[in-house]
Image (tube, helix red, strand yellow):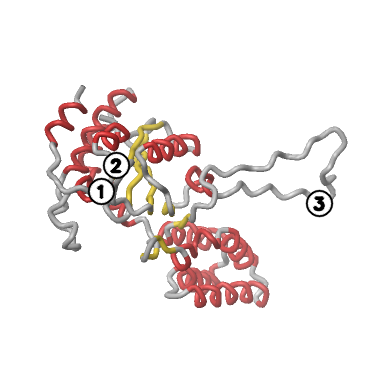
Amino acid sequence: MSPVEIAEYLHLPEQNKWSGILLLDGKYLNRHMVLLLAVDYRTQDVVSWRVAENESQDNYKQLITDVQNCGYIIKALISDGGTGIRALTQKKKPSFIRIGSRPYPRPGVSPAKEQTVFLSGVPHQWCIVHAQRELLKYVRTKAKKEEREKLTLLVNQILFSSTLIRAEKVRKKLNTYGYINYSEAAKRLTNIISSYWKLLIAHYTVRVGRFKIPPTTNVIENIISNLNTRLKTMKKIKTKKSAEAICRLIVLKYRLKPLVDSQDRQKRNKSPLELSIKKKGKLNWYLFIKKSCR
């Protein structure tokens, strides 16, 4: 059974306990295929999945379409900030015009069409751990040796500040440091952080119900590590059809397996799929497995 068929069978489009906070990520099965996952934050349920060739915007669009067909209402998005996912909520930034080039309108050349965003108005949080890796990689490769320690400290203070006000103060410090010390790396770093500022601070400002959205993708990373022991056996699989058949069973087993080690008492000894259903009752796992093997 596909995720959409499971959702329809359990009447999830009509009534469910999904939080609306969706986490997206991908796990490469081999060089040619990747398993794309969409996970609900509160129930830890894999709402939908898809085997694709890469983590492109089009493949994530198809995954989001499947998620919406399951009856899931997306209220916020959390991701590792990959370009394919980022394009779902952010407009592509225009390339800078070279000095001396003719601006629009040009004779005989129509202006570019206005960009449309697939998930317009949906808050998007870039995982601060992944953001830290990207920004510190820039510091290591582009900054001078004597300024790396200071820039690393400022980046960490911005990303892991306890409040938005503190994060903004440190961002101003970084900007001031760049101009006082004539640091091109600090100036460029300030521009990068400022251009993605909304993606970095969403966890301070966005609430879904009574809860703030998480700043990291830890939940989906833990699920991927849980699935990884079984996914390792798929490195030699060559066809997409075979990969989909195996992934269907692996993901279904995870959705039906009770969360024995959960620290949350309300989740303990309940499966992710069981947590997603509003009506109380036992799931017939044999039926799901039997239909999924067809």
Tag shown at residue 99: 3
Residue 289 % position (x, y): 16, 31
Closer mark to the observer between disc 1 and disc 3: 1
Residue beneath the point at 79% across and 36% down: 110
> Which residue is labeled 2 in the image?
12
- Answer with left or right where residue 9 lies relative to residue 134: left
Instruction: Check whether the beta carbons of the residues at disc 2 and disc 1 lie within 8 A of each other.
Output: yes
Q: Residues within 10 Å of mark 2 (few under 14, many from 20)?
A: some
Amino acid bearing label 2: Leu
Tag shown at residue 288: none
Residue 21 % position (x, y): 38, 54
Closer mark to the observer between disc 2 and disc 1: 2
Q: Is residue 292 above or below residue 230?
A: above
- Determine whether the residue tagged by mark 3 lies in a helix, strand or loop: loop
Cα separation between marks 2 and 1: 8 Å
Pick whichever, 273 or 55, lies toward us. Answer: 273
Instruction: Check whether the beta carbons of the residues at disc 1 and disc 3 lie within 8 A of each other.
Output: no
Amino acid bearing label 1: Ser
- Answer with left or right where residue 61 lies relative to residue 248: right
Q: Is residue 183 above or below residue 235?
A: below
> Which residue is labeled 1 in the image?
276
Cα separation between marks 1 and 3: 55 Å
Which of the two labelled residues, at mark 1 and mark 3, occupies the earlier sequence position? 3
Pick whichever, 120 or 95, lies toward us. Answer: 120
Tell me the quarter of the image containing the C terminus: top left
Which of the two labelled residues, at mark 2 and mark 3, occupies the earlier sequence position? 2
